[in-house]
Image (cartoon, rainbow, N blue to C red):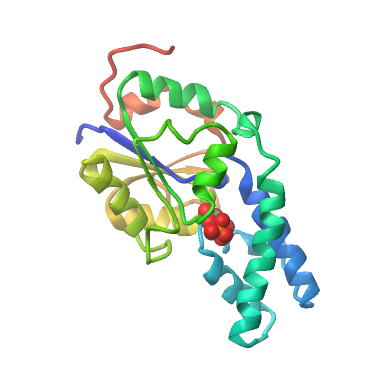
Amino acid sequence: MTEKKAIIFDLDGVIVDTATFHFYAWRNLARKLGIDFNEKDNEQLKGVSRVESLKKILEWGNKSIPDDEFEQLMEEKNREYLSYVDQMQPEDILPDVMPTLEFLKVNKVRMAIGSASKNTKRILNNVGLLDLFDAIVDGIKVTKAKPDPEVFLTGANNLNVDPKECLVFEDSIAGVTAANAGGFLSVGIGDAETLHHAHHCFSDFNEIGNDFFTKAGFQFTKSKN
Ligand code: BG6
Ligand code: MG
């Protein structure tokens, strides 16, 4: 097994529960357009860029709209989304994420964020995590949306590791596909059936013991905190 040195974390739905905020904001916008979609359909939007998400929703509703209206709707969705995001605090980091990040940090594991979101830095700042990661690759830096592996390949490059030496934590179908396509060891966070293509899957961070990291190929010198 290749020795592992680094981890790239998706943000929305892995570190913080913003996946729910995206769902509310898209659902409210879609309803105004007379398009309904449920939480199962929403799985198709997770990890997907803002532009691609709106394209999918319009497709589901068989609607086509002029470009300026498209732009306006994206802005409207983002405004509602940010009204939730701007109430976030460090307490909104998902349960058991912090002890895991601290343990990895103490053991000098290189860590990055790999997110499709253009709001990545704003969210990290709101929850007090802006300085914890060695690299942040967000929706502003990449041109190809997940399931393209660009975001993770850029992350690995910034961390100076080969994809083989790196894990990717993801809650989305598109994100796991991207990680696999890039040659990373993919770790799904969420429903094992939805994320069946992940190499490993956990329902949340509480389920991940330190022995998982050791078995995956990390060599630690310090035990838990
Ligand atoms: C991803 C989310 O992390 O970021 C998607 O899973 C979202 O749901 C995408 O559409 C883009 O986010 P933003 O914040 O730039 O609209
Ligand atoms: Mg996500």
Residue 195 appears left or right of 68 = left
Q: Quadrant of residue 66?
A: bottom right
Front residue of 138/68: it is 68
Query: Residue 199, position in %: x, y?
Result: 38, 45
Where is residue 151 drawn, in percent x and y? 36, 55
**Could you tell me which residue is drawn at 39 percent across and 35 percent down?**
133
Quadrant of the frame with the N terminus: top left
Q: Which residue is drawn at 32% across and 24% down?
A: 214
- Viewer-proximal residue among 37 and 73: 73
User: Where is residue 74 shown, x and y percent of the image?
Assistant: 63, 69
- Position of 147 with respect to 163 (left or right) is right
Residue 52 in sight here: yes
- The number of numbered badges drawn on the structure is 0
Quadrant location, the C terminus: top left
Q: Is residue 19 left or right of residue 136?
A: right
Q: Which residue is drawn at 50% across and 45% down?
A: 121
Residue 14 in sight from this viewpoint: no
Q: 144 above or below 134?
A: below
Horizontal relation, residue 40 to residue 132: left or right: right
